Image: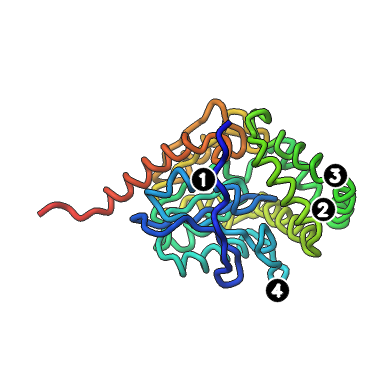
Amino acid sequence: MAEPVPHWPGRMVGDVHVRSTPPGAPEQAVFVHGLAGAATNWTDLMDELKDDVTGHAIDLPGAGHSPAPADGDYSVAAHAAAVVRLLDQVGPAHLFGNSMGGAVCVRVAAGRPELVRSLTLISPALPDLLPRSGPVRVAAAATPRLGEWVASRLKLIPAEQRINASFAVVWADMAAVHPVRLREAIEEQRRRDELPYSAAAMIGSARGIVAEYFRRGADNLWRQAEKVQAPTLIIHGRHDRLVRPAMAARAARAFRDLRLVLLPRAGHVAMMEVPRVVAAEARRLIRETRLGNAPLPG
């Protein structure tokens, strides 16, 4: 395996930590990670796209190197507000989201369409009446008191064991994980274990996504998807153990301008597993959006 690129440098932008590729590309992009993720989940995809877009990967409040929010709000709406604040700094951008980050991005695109040039969702965590075992475990961890108990017990398990178990769920093929990326994830988990708010951030975000699955009315995420105006790409991995690829059928009915892609060798984090393939699909959408916004000749 070739040595992976280093993670992009980060800085605080307002109240969140953001990692960015070097400036100079013709357009901007913002990348939003999922539950238990961080901005570093996007490193390899951002490298593939750095000539097309200047990428900005956010650590959502309480995740990665972002501090806990002052109000303790880890809801999807609160995460969406953090993304909007970043977009207000960056300007209109191509928006990428994975898993819970996909749900966050749908809220952003529906509520602030002028900030979103295109929308790429990778295994988005949109409400599913037949969730897989992973989301069921998330729901259990989000249960009052039980979630705190689970978090306290998990800290007794070595970080290496926890990361290996997590990667085995989200990757289609654990053997494909680069040893450097695995080591980085273990070191980051050890760092997170020392933070006083790490358990609250995980439990709060889990409760936030579970709440979205049961939300009714105009604020339901599928109703929000119907409001999205930006050209949208949804990528599913055939071996996703957390989000059913069959949800693509409902997405096709909800999003007004949608292209669906099923990757036969990917799991839940295709942008980490097959970044070059995901980049090719995203680049096509970015360039089509650019052409669609170009003035007519004459």
Distance from the alpha carbon under mark 1 to that under mark 3: 32 Å
* Residue 156 visible in this rendered orientation of the protein: yes
Q: Earlier in the sequence, mark 4 or mark 3?
A: 4
Q: Quadrant of the N terminus?
A: top right
Amino acid type at mark 4: Ala
* Distance (Cα) linking label 4 and label 1: 29 Å
Badge 4 is on which residue?
70
The alpha-carbon separation of the residues under discs 4 and 2 comes to 22 Å
For mark 3, what is the residue? Answer: 158
Gap between marks 2 and 1 measured at Cα:
27 Å
Task: Using the image, tell me which numbered label, if any, was put on residue 18.
Answer: none
Q: Could you tell whether 204 is left or right of 246 in the image?
A: right
Secondary element under disc 2, as helix, strand or loop, is loop
The three-letter amino acid code for the residue at tag 2 is Thr
Q: Position of residue 48 (x, y in %)?
A: 45, 43
First in sequence: mark 4 or mark 2?
Answer: 4
User: In percent of the image, x 42 and y 55: which residue is there?
Assistant: 54
The residue to which callout 1 is attached is 121
Q: Nearer the viewer, mark 4 or mark 2?
A: 4
Q: Secondary structure at mark 3?
A: loop
- Number of the front mark, 2 or 3: 3
The answer to whether residue 130 is seen in the rendering is no
Residue at left offset 60%, top offset 50%? 40
Q: Position of residue 186 (x, y in %)?
A: 74, 46
Which residue in the structure is indicated by mark 2? Answer: 143
